[in-house]
Image (cartoon, rainbow, N blue to C red):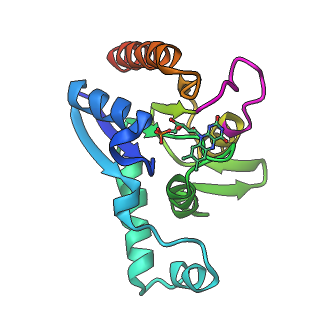
Amino acid sequence: MKNFLFLKSSVLQQYSVSNQLIDEAFADVQGNKELISLDELNIPELSVANFAKLNDETSAERAFQKEQIAKLKEKQVVVIGAPMYNFSTSVQLKKYIDLISKAGETFNYTENGPVGYLKAEHLVIVTSRGGAYHENGIDFFEQYLKMSFGFLGVKNIHFIYAEKMAYGDEVKNQSINQARKDLKELLASF
Ligand SMILES: Cc1cc2nc3c(=O)[nH]c(=O)nc-3n(C[C@H](O)[C@H](O)[C@H](O)COP(=O)(O)O)c2cc1C
């Protein structure tokens, strides 16, 4: 039995495509599983004040950071809903990446360069967007996510695309159905 962590990061509530795909996959998958909505996690943003707190071993923010890193590190499969907003990530997912990217805990620089400490066997990114980027070779957001989690040590990063959400209902539904099928097959293969 695999240990799964599912993270949602859309702001569109019941209208969110990525939330819908993540909810369905969470319900479907067999194994130990946990589902978190990053918006509800109330992650501190990386402000001047919070940065100081995150470097204070006695603060509640630091305790929260340790808890989230520990949770992430124990999971074998991590599935993240990643809607594209303004060509990039939701604030919620950015705050999460800022939170869990901690020197000495999820990465370090060594004489031989950076080393990541995340041991997840698979990371699956379910990314929804109004337009088409992946097939056009202009997917900056995909590169950002690959870099962020690759740097932290994740070797197998898979992408499920729900693109063309703004191309009308027919194209949208076709794309969601394909993404749903791809996600189900991928998770079943682990
Ligand atoms: C604030 C906002 C910004 C968006 N920016 C982009 C964008 O830059 N490129 C794009 O293709 N679609 C953009 N969209 C469309 C979303 O990517 C699309 O609605 C997608 O389904 C979002 O994922 P979600 O439904 O899980 O929230 C944007 C939507 C919102 C609400």
- Dominant secondary structure, magenta: loop
Which residue is at the far front? 168
38 versus 181 height, above or below: below
User: Which quarter shows the N terminus?
Assistant: top left
Task: Specify the quarter for ligand 1.
Answer: top right
**Quadrant in the rendering for residue 62:** bottom left
Q: Say if the magenta span includes residue 134.
A: yes
Q: Residue at x 59, y 42 (%)?
A: 153
Q: Which residue is drawn at 68% across and 23% down?
A: 134
| Between 30 and 1, the one nearer to me in the picture | 30
Residue 58 in the image, given as x and y percentages of width and height: 42, 87
Q: Could you tell me if residue 79 is visible in this image?
A: no
**Quadrant in the rendering for residue 150:** top right
Q: Residue at x 70, y 26 (%)?
A: 133
Q: Could you tell me if residue 95 is visible in this image?
A: yes
| Between 185 and 24, the one nearer to me in the picture | 24
User: Which quarter shows the C terminus?
Assistant: top left
Q: What stretch is highlighted in magenta?
A: 130-141
Q: Which residue is drawn at 47% across and 20% down?
A: 169
